[in-house]
Image (cartoon, grey):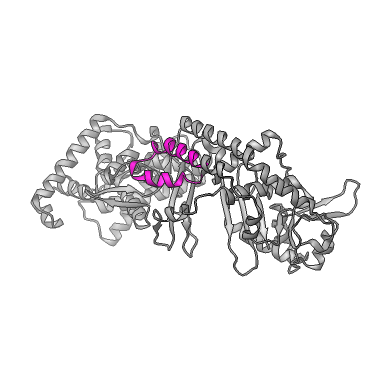
């Protein structure tokens, strides 16, 4: 366990205890929240540096007491604390006086309004009429809140809820945005770096809940939950509902082992059909590509510099048709077909033209300028094999576009920003804009590390040879797509049956308000990333595709359109 993991676990476990400690010392709720925030910050910082601590309770008490002492000294200096609020430091054990400690902790779980009223009435000894006047609330409302607070604390003590160390927390294993990002390119994981934030969102996914209900569900003080909820609502990941409730606006997939096995069984069945009905047509085209191979350096994409033409002139280059060309590293047909199969299934098995238009109805405009559907999956070992991701770059300042498909078969970085830089570097290398000079050593190292350029020395200790380790083509994405065989009509009909099977299986694991989105997301399953993973697996089992070599895993399923 890393220092950060240990620190995160301890903070979640002790957060409510720290708040109870602060509340017992300060009495005033504003000062208590300030003190608890300072203690949590200092504890977290200390644990990140120190790592594992044997006696956590004693360690946190010492830090809490020191922070409390400094806070008192600071506030007394500023004369902002009354003598009534100040208490001389005394020995305090976080585990002693359990009933009182539980009551203090349960106060932290009340809503903001109920916390204020409870503290003002029981700690500041204010009359309910005084509280109503100060908060500008009807007296009946104040009485209702104080009664609800008492009932909630009493019920919680009777039920003896498990504390947070025994609480099972979920974790998002995969997050994605379906749609458009804003100009700042902020993706969904930016908003969900904290496990607490992920658990707040998950708690209110199946049905609307109040902040107090969410806090009780994940055993975190309501004060923390309220801030998180405000932030999620502000950025469109939760929406306000009647009666002070909130509903999560994320499509969350939480399939257990049983459902994952069922979905895998369905996908495997239809992947076999795709391999029988469509892949042979694709390989016919691939073989036609290979028959037009030319060994002439002139058949390289014309964008290549003279230096590159000389360097790769001895390579056999795969050519499409007469003037349209494609380059596969070392003329490897197997490597080329990995990319062609993935690309073709994505483009040609996508048989519902209005799929994106239907999904557009579910997209949400974000504060950062984005407009997308937020999606997340819960960590689950049983369905991790199907994970995949499409990365596309659009033509910007340079005349090329790229496509790549990330799966369990490769060893590629998932950071889109990394690849944008790498593609530009590779393009500059191909065109001769950058050469092997000391000032470019960092750029070349990244190209080598990511496998885009491979340098080999012959076994006999001869010259070092170099080659570009990615599929290149002077075709546009549209032109390549047009050369690929269309989906057979019979496969279209079977694809619709697949969509319905997946929808029926999936919908019971999503709340009713997400069933329409679930149905649309289950359309075009034949072209989905998960299905393509199963198609590739099927082709490997049949021996149609051969296993990838070490360097090929770094750039498989990638095409650069020059």
Picture layout, residue 395 above or below residue 254? below
Which image quadrant for residue 399? bottom right
Residue at coordinates 37% horizontally, 45% vertically from top-left?
A: 514
Q: How many marks?
A: 0
Q: Quadrant of residue 157?
A: top left
Task: Say left or right for 133 vs 107.
Answer: left
Determine the residue positioned at 62% across, 52% down: 404
Residue 506 on the magenta span:
yes
Q: Position of residue 102 (x, y in %)?
A: 27, 36
Give the x, y percent position of residue 85. Answer: 22, 51
- Asked whether residue 340 is in view, the answer is yes
Magenta region, main secondary structure: helix
456 left or right of 16? Answer: right
For the C terminus, which image quadrant? bottom right
Q: Nearer the viewer, residue 543 or 260?
A: 543
Q: Residue at x 36, y 53 (%)?
A: 232
In this picture, residue 510 sits left or right of residue 266: left
Q: Is residue 508 above or below residue 471?
A: above
What are the residue bounds of the magenta stretch?
Answer: 495-524
Which residue is at 67% across, 46% downward? 282
The x and y percentages for residue 352 are 49, 50
- Work out whether residue 502 or residue 224 is closer to the camera in this orientation and state it: 502
The verdict on residue 478 being magenta is: no
Residue 198 vs 467, above or below: the answer is above
Q: Position of residue 361 (x, y in %)?
A: 39, 55
Choose top left, top right, bottom left or bottom right for residue 318: bottom right
Whether residue 88 is visible: no
């Amino acid at each position: 366990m890393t220092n950060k993991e240990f620190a995160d676990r301890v903070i979640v476990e002790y957060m409510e205890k720290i708040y109870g400690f602060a509340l017992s010392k300060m009495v005033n709720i504003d000062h208590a929240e300030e003190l608890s925030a300072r203690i949590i910050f200092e504890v977290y910082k200390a644990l990140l540096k120190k790592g594992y601590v044997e006696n956590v309770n004693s360690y946190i008490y010492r830090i809490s007491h020191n922070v409390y002492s400094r806070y008192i000294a600071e506030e007394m200096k500023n004369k902002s604390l009354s003598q009534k609020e100040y208490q001389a430091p005394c020995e305090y054990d976080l585990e002693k006086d359990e009933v009182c400690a539980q009551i203090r902790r349960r106060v932290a779980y009340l809503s903001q309004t109920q916390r204020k009223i409870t503290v003002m009435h029981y700690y500041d000894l204010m009359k309910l009429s005084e509280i109503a006047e100060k908060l500008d609330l009807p007296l009946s409302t104040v009485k209702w809140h104080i009664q609800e607070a008492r009932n909630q604390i009493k019920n919680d003590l009777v039920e003896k809820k498990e504390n947070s160390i025994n609480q099972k927390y979920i974790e998002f294993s995969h997050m994605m945005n379906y749609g458009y990002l804003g100009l700042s390119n902020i993706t969904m994981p930016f908003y969900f770096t904290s496990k607490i934030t992920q658990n707040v969102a998950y708690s209110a996914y199946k049905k609307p809940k109040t902040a107090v209900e969410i806090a009780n569900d994940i055993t975190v003080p309501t004060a923390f939950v309220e801030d998180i909820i405000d932030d999620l609502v502000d950025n469109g990941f939760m929406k306000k509902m009647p009666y002070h409730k909130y509903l999560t606006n994320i499509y969350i997939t939480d399939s257990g082992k049983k459902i994952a096995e069922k979905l895998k069984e369905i996908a495997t069945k239809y992947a076999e059909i795709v391999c029988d009905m469509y892949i042979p047509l694709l390989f016919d085209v691939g073989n036609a590509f290979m028959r037009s191979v030319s060994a002439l350096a002139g058949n390289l994409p014309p964008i290549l510099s003279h230096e590159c033409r000389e360097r790769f002139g001895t390579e056999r280059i795969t050519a499409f048709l007469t003037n349209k060309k494609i380059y596969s590293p070392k003329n490897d047909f197997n490597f080329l077909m990995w990319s062609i199969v993935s690309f073709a299934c994505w483009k040609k098995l996508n048989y519902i033209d209005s799929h994106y238009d239907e999904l557009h109805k579910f997209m949400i405009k974000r504060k950062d300028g984005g407009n997308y559907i937020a999606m997340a999956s819960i960590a689950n070992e049983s369905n991790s094999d199907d994970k995949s991701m499409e990365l596309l770059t659009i033509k910007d300042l340079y005349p090329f576009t790229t496509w790549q498909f990330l799966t369990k078969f490769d060893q590629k970085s998932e950071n889109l920003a990394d690849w944008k830089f790498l593609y530009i570097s590779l393009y500059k290398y191909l065109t001769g804009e950058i050469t092997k000079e000391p000032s470019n050593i960092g750029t070349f190292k990244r190209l080598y590390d990511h496998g885009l350029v491979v340098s080999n020395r012959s076994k006999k200790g001869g010259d070092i040879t170099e080659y570009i380790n990615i599929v290149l083509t002077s075709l546009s994405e549209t032109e390549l797509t047009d050369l690929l065989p269309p989906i057979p009509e019979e496969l279209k009909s079977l694809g619709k049956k697949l969509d319905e099977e997946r929808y029926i299986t999936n919908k019971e694991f999503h709340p009713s308000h997400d069933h329409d989105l679930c149905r649309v997301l289950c359309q075009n399953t034949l072209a989905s990333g998960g299905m393509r993973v199963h198609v590739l697996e099927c082709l490997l089992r049949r021996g149609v595709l051969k296993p990838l070599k070490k360097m090929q895993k770094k750039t498989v399923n990638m095409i650069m359109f020059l």
